[in-house]
Each structure stands twice: as structure tokens, then as C-alpha cells.
């Protein structure tokens, strides 16, 4: 008798092992809106002034669409320390934070109200020289810092051993950067799905670098966005709850969509902020 060409594999109850497939852990713990709480210690004067500031800002937001050339904003630099501290604690912290290193040092934090940002500028000595609340998709200083610290073209670095597609990918990035115009949809290169070697990634990192604008979005897992040395080119990298890289992309765009507040966010914030101001008045 000839040997049976197909191996016999037992099936049915009791035939399978306890081993299960191993999957890469996906992001977890999506953030949802929670109304901020008032600080335990505050004066009536500071509380009344904070409510007035937010009232003025809300009226400005209702009069301007999200993404207006001049966003709704209010300057806090001249306000008493107690008022600024009260606004910091009461507005809370949202999904996106950002900072720039050049040409100026900016720190921006989205509040618990989406599309509403606290924007601080640091002087050379580390002191705060500007402080404001701004309603926008993302603060304009982040765009300006990217444009001021990037180049229109790069000289490719020397090729290294073990490369497969690094040179071609860099050429594609350079070409898309040169063609990009403001407002154009993103051109995304998904490095996670492409056949790239460690040498390719080292080549791209070496050529593009990580530059002076960094953002972190915590909406669903962590997404880190960093400007590069090339104009309108960003690293956009997604991490799971164990801080393992699960999606590595290069985006050629004005600003990656993952950090931008949407029109729906803005509408919700206008409604929620009105309710929150009413609560401040009652307090």
C-alpha cells in the first residue's frame, strides 16, 4: 500500500491544544468627555472673573467658525495668578498636547473641551511671556514652527548595506513634499505594511530626522506626531497601551488630521462650555 499523502490531523472536541494565537495588543482605554471639576480652594472674585473670561470667549466662538483666519481667543497674560490657576484646573486636560523648540518655545494643551486650547510661550529664561485661550483646530504656532524649521529639499544620505526600498521611499517623500500645496489631502506612506528593512528605516530616520514640533494625541492609545527636516512631512506613529509601535507612517500634509479638532467637536464644545459657565455662575 502506498503511503497516504495527506497527514491525518485529529479534529473535534479534545483534539486541540490550549495554545492560542498571539496577537499584538491594540490600543485600549479611549478617552471620553468628562466635565472638569472646580478647585477646592478659590475666591469668589477669581471665580467671577473666570466666568466673565469664558463668557467673552464663548460669545466670540459663537460668532466665528472653526478654522477662521482669526480664531476666537482671549489673552490671559494680564490676569491675576489665581484666575489663571483656576482656569487651568477647571478647564482640565484634553486629548492633544504639543510643544515647539524653535523658532520660539510654545506649549499647547487642548482642554477637556475639544478645540479649546491653552497656549503658552516661554522666553529664553523659561518664564511665561504669553498666555492665552484659543478656539481652533490646532494652534497656528505649530504650523509656523514647522515651516520655519524645515527645508524645501534634502540631500539624500549615503546608501547603507541591507537596504531594500529606503532610497525609493525617500525619493517619493521628496517628490510629494515638492508638489504639496496648502489645503491638499494627505499623502500617507504606511511603513508598517511595506517591505522595509531595519536598514531602510534607519536610512529614512537619518534623512528626515525628528525636528522642532512634537504632538501627542491620547484619543485611542497614543499617537505621536513629529515634524521632520522636510517641509510638510511628518512622522505619525501609533502605539498601543504597552507603548509598542503598531503603525508607523509618514504623512505629507499641512497638519496630520489625528491632532485636528473637527467641526462636530467645536459645536459640542460651544454647548458644553455654555453649561459649564452656568455652573460657574451658580457656584
Image: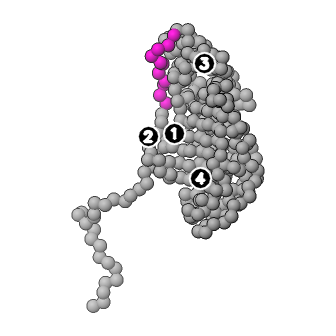
Foreground residue, 162 or 216?
Answer: 162
* Residue positioned 56% across, 53% down in the render: 248
**Residue 2 among those drawn in magenta:** no
Query: Is disc 1 surrounded by few (<14), some (14 to 19) or many (20+) residues within 10 Å?
Result: many
Q: Earlier in the sequence, mark 1 or mark 3?
A: 3
* Residue positioned 28% across, 68% down in the render: 11
Spatial separation of the CA atoms under disc 2 and disc 3: 30 Å
Q: Earlier in the sequence, mark 2 or mark 3?
A: 2
Spatial separation of the CA atoms under disc 4 and disc 1: 17 Å
At which x and y percent is residue 60?
A: 67, 21
Residue 147, image quadrant: top right
Spatial separation of the CA atoms under disc 4 and disc 3: 38 Å
Spatial separation of the CA atoms under disc 1 and disc 3: 25 Å
The residue under label 4 is 249
The stretch of residues the image draws in magenta is 33-43
Give the number of the disc on residue 218.
Answer: 1
Foreground residue, 149 or 168?
Answer: 149
At which x and y percent is residue 241?
A: 44, 45
Do the residues under discs 2 and 4 have CB atoms within 8 angstroms? Answer: no
Spatial separation of the CA atoms under disc 2 and disc 4: 22 Å
Query: Is disc 3 surrounded by few (<14), some (14 to 19) or many (20+) residues within 10 Å?
Result: many
Q: Is residue 273 above or below residue 208?
A: above
Q: Earlier in the sequence, mark 2 or mark 4?
A: 2
The residue under label 2 is 29
Q: Which element carries disc 3, helix, strand or loop?
A: helix
Spatial separation of the CA atoms under disc 1 and disc 2: 9 Å
The residue under label 3 is 54
Task: Tell me which secondary structure the magenta stretch mostly adopts.
Answer: loop
At which x and y percent is residue 268?
A: 56, 28
Q: Which of marks 1 and 2 is nearer the N terminus?
A: 2
Amino acid at each position: 500500500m502506498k503511503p497516504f499523502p495527506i497527514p491525518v490531523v485529529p479534529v473535534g472536541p479534545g483534539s486541540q491544544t490550549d495554545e492560542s494565537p498571539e496577537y499584538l495588543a491594540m490600543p485600549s482605554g479611549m478617552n471620553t468627555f468628562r466635565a472638569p471639576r472646580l478647585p477646592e480652594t478659590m475666591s469668589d472674585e477669581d471665580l467671577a472673573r473666570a466666568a466673565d473670561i469664558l463668557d467673552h470667549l464663548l460669545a466670540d466662538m459663537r460668532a466665528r467658525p472653526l478654522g477662521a483666519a482669526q480664531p476666537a481667543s482671549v489673552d490671559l497674560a494680564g490676569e491675576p495668578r489665581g484666575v489663571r490657576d483656576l482656569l487651568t484646573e477647571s478647564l482640565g486636560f484634553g486629548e492633544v498636547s504639543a510643544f515647539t523648540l524653535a523658532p520660539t518655545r510654545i506649549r499647547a494643551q487642548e482642554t477637556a473641551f475639544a478645540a479649546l486650547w491653552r497656549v503658552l510661550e516661554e522666553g529664553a529664561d523659561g518664564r511665561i511671556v504669553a498666555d492665552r485661550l484659543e478656539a481652533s483646530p490646532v494652534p497656528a504656532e505649530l504650523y509656523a514652527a514647522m515651516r520655519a524649521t524645515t527645508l524645501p529639499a534634502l540631500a539624500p544620505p549615503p546608501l547603507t548595506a541591507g537596504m531594500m526600498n529606503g532610497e525609493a521611499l525617500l525619493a517619493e517623500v521628496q517628490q510629494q513634499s515638492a508638489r504639496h500645496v496648502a489645503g491638499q489631502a494627505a499623502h500617507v506612506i504606511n511603513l508598517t505594511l511595506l517591505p522595509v528593512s531595519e536598514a531602510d528605516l534607519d536610512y529614512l530616520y537619518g534623512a528626515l530626522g525628528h525636528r522642532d514640533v512634537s504632538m501627542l494625541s491620547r484619543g485611542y492609545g497614543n499617537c505621536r506626531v513629529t515634524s521632520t527636516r522636510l517641509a510638510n512631512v511628518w512622522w505619525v506613529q501609533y502605539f498601543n497601551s504597552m507603548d509598542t509601535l503598531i503603525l508607523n507612517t509618514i504623512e505629507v500634509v499641512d497638519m496630520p488630521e489625528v491632532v485636528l479638532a473637527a467641526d462636530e467637536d467645536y459645536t459640542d464644545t460651544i454647548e458644553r462650555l455654555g453649561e459649564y459657565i452656568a455652573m460657574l455662575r451658580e457656584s
